[in-house]
Image (tube, helix red, strand yellow):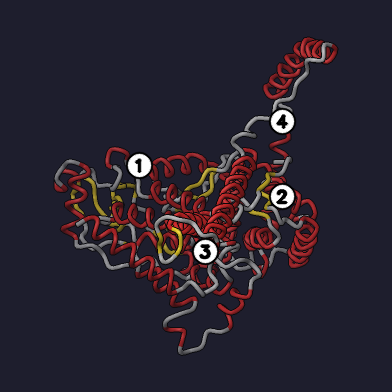
Amino acid sequence: MAGNSSMARSAQILRFVLKHRASGVFADPGSDTVVVAEVVESPQEADDLGPVAFVRDLEALGPTFIKLGQSLSTRTDMVPPAYLAALERMQDDVLPVPAAEIREIVEAELGVRLGKLFKEFEDVPLGSASLAQVHRAVLNDGREVAVKVQRPGVDNEAMIDLDTLAGLARRADSATGIGRRVRFSEWVQEFRKSLMAELDYRLEADNLERFGERLADYPELQVPAPLRDLCTRRVLTMELVRGTKVTSLGGLRRTENDYELLASALMRGYLDQVFVHGEIHADPHPGNMLVTEEGRLAIFDLGMVAHVPPRQREHLLKLLLASVDGRGEEVAGETIAMSIQLEDFDEVRYVREVSHLVARYAAHGGSQALSEGRLMLELARLGLTCGLRSPPEMQMLGKTLLNLEGVSRALEPELDVKRVVDGHLQSLMRQRMRQAFSPSRLAGDAMELQALLQEAPRRLSTILSLVSENKLRVNIGGLQESRLTENLQKIANRVAAGVIVAALIMASAMLMRGDVAGPKLFGYPAVAMVMFLLASALGFGIVLSVLVSDRRPKVREERSPRA
């Protein structure tokens, strides 16, 4: 039965892909398909095709695809603008699971009856999303808590969906030009890791604790603390924080409170998370933040947190600093340094386009039309158009900044986001410089220099000895396993097979024309006919092998030496 359900689910996903295959989503940047997808749609077609229908069908496919849509909303290099706008409005509100099922899950996960754990447990959820729903509860000591419970069957459904997506991605990578450029299979693998981490609430509890400790320097911000004894893979119990959504703040409350401090603290705190601690909270949208009665900004839903390697942090920090200063060529240089160059990478065009984009951003002063987050996403789109595949961290940072800008402007519409970002980035850079010249860092550098100086004479003497004795050799590894050798062998085999086929045909033709004694087949000498049929079969096999097994060469990729 499980196999049948898996096949049915795969067929459902395939129908979705076939229905929207001409939509322009996943089309090669700059191709005509993207334009058609945006302008051809008529009112009659809008119900079945187009951005709204695409998002509606994604939501109908269930939790995995709702999360997939949220991930797609960061990929300006794969998704046309009209679809990006629709994906950003994607809803994640679903009908709640019956309270009896939720109670069973909590008791099974925690191993204790609810009555022994909680004085109260409300059956009506505070919120219900595609992966989980949240219920208010009261502990026996009187503390109010929020209990986040994973919906039943979500993890199994996600595994089936992810396996199907991985198979489709592999086929798209080998059969389409955009697949060879974007590498859908790598993106699906990253999405798999992100979703599997989000389905393990023990990791989210770790994130809550870590973010709470790191944001302690910002008293304006609050992260609810988890209760570790009441957290499992499918149940997360944390402090209950009451407040008002940032999008629901009334005019009277705005006049009585200065929310600019909250907005500024939010931007600075998240910049610290990225550039100091190397973590990106990928989903800080307004629905995950509340303004408490005490005037603090509470942050929830820390399931999607990505790690940024130190080298990438350096490039991203320099990129943002150069952007706010309007140095377009430096922005292009940093983006190239952390990206993968495809075979058709046009560096001259890319630098020119990026310079124009950054100049426009600097002239607008970080306005909503071209903000920091929008700039990062636009850089990724320009990159793929010019043959440069940008790292996922850059696009994730762009989406995060875009969400943060939305929250900040909801708190304080007149906030100068660019000034806040620029000021804090300068502060972070000064902090980096002080750390670079700290006694411990200098001592480490001195030890490395000492080791280099001690080893240099011996290694130089070894090289000179090898040169003087004519024993210096350079080994090139991997040539026998390279695609060049494989292709040369394939060519040689086909040439040899072609010669054999030609010889058999020539020999059979000569025998058919002569008066050869012996058995006949279709009126011709049997030996000649057998040779002819054998040659025909071999020739057909060669043609079939060319059509079926020959693949287009992979797009050659090259990392920048500055990476």
Asked which quadrant contains residue 54, the reply is bottom left
Which marked residue is nearer to the observer: mark 2 or mark 4? 2
Residue type, mark 2 in image: Ile
Where does the image place residue 30, in percent across and percent down from the top left? 66, 69
Q: Which residue is mark 3?
A: 73
Residue pictured at 76% horizontal, 66% vertical = 360
Label 2 to label 4: alpha-carbon separation: 25 Å
Where does the image place residue 337, in percent across and percent down from the top left? 71, 46
Label 3 to label 1: alpha-carbon separation: 27 Å
Left or right, 103 with respect to 143, comes to: left
Which numbered disc, 3 or 4, marks the residue that appears first in the sequence? Answer: 3
Q: Which residue is mark 2?
A: 336
Q: Residues within 10 Å of mark 2 (few under 14, many from 20)?
A: many
Where does the image place residue 176, in percent across and percent down from the top left? 55, 62
Q: Which residue is mark 1?
A: 202
Q: Quadrant of the C terminus?
A: top right
Which numbered disc, 2 or 1, marks the residue that appears first in the sequence? Answer: 1
Which numbered disc, 2 or 4, marks the residue that appears first in the sequence? Answer: 2
Which marked residue is nearer to the observer: mark 3 or mark 4? 3
